[in-house]
Amino acid sequence: KEQIKKFIKRYFTVVWLRYFKMQIPFLIRHRGVFQDLETWIVWGNIALSHQYFLHKANSKNVIKDPIKLYNYYSRVASVKVERGINASSIADISNIPRATVIRKLKWLVKHEAIKKNKNLEYQMKNKGKLNKKISENFILNQNYVAEFLTDIFDYMKNSSFRI
């Protein structure tokens, strides 16, 4: 851990360049799926909330089969969690105006990426064409993250960049 931190500090611009080569296309791919980045941020808050409650539910052995990379999104989205996140919380967390958050939530509900529960909280939903695109994007992005990390470790081990 300390070696990695030291490497990043010493060769910050090299690491930053590799990071941006990963991050900018990452954001562009999300914009392509969600039509704009604000909608992705709204959906992302719901996905993070779902992951939080899924983690809590995991202690109750809710998940029976192993989750793998290729089925990660569909398996996680299909697990029913007790709670969600409301529009006001999303607006507070994201700094997106509440009216805009509500408009984005309506779009996501319409495209069956999320659902609203009886407590007016939003949760992930595993239906619709948009979820297929989200899942494909997730797998693609995981490959790019792995490539980024591999490049950094390769720089540390095999290049002229040394600590």
Image (tube, grey):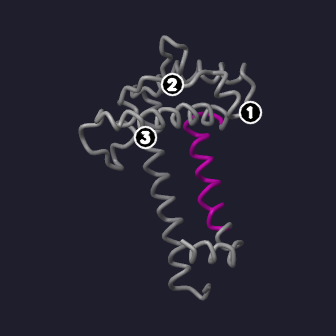
Which mark is in front, 2 or 3?
Answer: 2
- Residue at the image point whose x is 63% and y is 24% from the top: 104
Q: Is 162 situated above or below 34?
A: below
Q: Position of residue 62 (x, y in %)?
A: 30, 33
Q: Which residue is mark 2?
A: 84
The furthest residue to the front: 59
The disc labelled 2 sits on which kind of residue? Gly
| Quadrant in which residue 92 is drawn | top right
The answer to whether the residue labelled 2 contacts the one labelled 1, judged by CB atoms less than 8 Å apart, is: no
Classify 10 Å Cα crowding around label 1: few (below 14), some (14-19), many (20 and above).
Answer: few
- Residue at the image point whose x is 69% and y is 74% from the top: 9
Q: Which residue is mark 3?
A: 135
Mark found first going from the N terminus, 2 or 3: 2
The furthest residue to the bottom: 160
Asked if residue 121 lies left or right of residue 135, the reply is right
Disc 1 is placed on an element classified as loop
Q: Position of residue 26 (x, y in %)?
A: 58, 51
The disc labelled 1 sits on which kind of residue? Asn
Disc 3 is placed on an element classified as helix
- Looking at the rendering, the stretch of residues picked out in magenta corresponds to 17-36
The answer to whether the residue labelled 3 contacts the one labelled 1, judged by CB atoms less than 8 Å apart, is: no
Between the residue at mark 2 and the residue at mark 3, the CA separation in whole angstroms equals 20 Å
The furthest residue to the left: 65
Q: Is 132 situated above or below 82?
A: below
Q: Position of residue 141 (x, y in %)?
A: 50, 52
